[in-house]
Image (cartoon, rainbow, N blue to C red):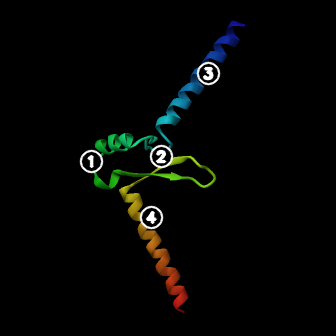
Amino acid sequence: MRKIIILLSLAFALSGCEWWLAQYDNGDGLPTIRSQEDVDAYNATVSSESEKLVCDRERIVGSNFPQWICFTVAQRDRMALEGREAVDTIRGLNAN
């Protein structure tokens, strides 16, 4: 019985650690953002302007709860460029 209690305690402790880590890291190396203060704190730790986070509160499709959506400046610039290139490609196809 004692071994079962120890194993269950260990399982709960490990699942608690996993939950805690999931709260502060979403798998891509960036912290989970919950407020503008979190954004400001993260941006204070990076030296390059392209690594700074730009975050917005957006409602995700299928949910009424807004979530923080964050991208680095470099990621936003790349997405904007890819979007412009896609529009230019579509315009080029329609011109023929």
Q: Residue furthest top?
A: 2
The Cα atoms of the two marked residues, 2 and 1, are separated by 19 Å
Q: Earlier in the sequence, mark 3 or mark 4?
A: 3
Q: Is residue 22 left or right of residue 79?
A: right
Q: Mark 1 — residue?
A: 47
Residue type of the residue flagged with mark 2:
Asp
Q: Nearer the viewer, mark 4 or mark 2?
A: 4
Q: Earlier in the sequence, mark 2 or mark 1?
A: 2
Where residue 48 appears, as percent x and y from the top left, is 28, 52
Which circle's residue, 1 or 4, is located before the other in the chain? 1
- Above or below for 71 versus 7: below
Q: Position of residue 78 (x, y in %)?
A: 41, 64
Q: Which residue is mark 4?
A: 79
Say which residue label 2 marks.
28
In what element is the residue under mark 1? Answer: loop
Q: What amino acid is labelled 3 in the image?
A: Phe
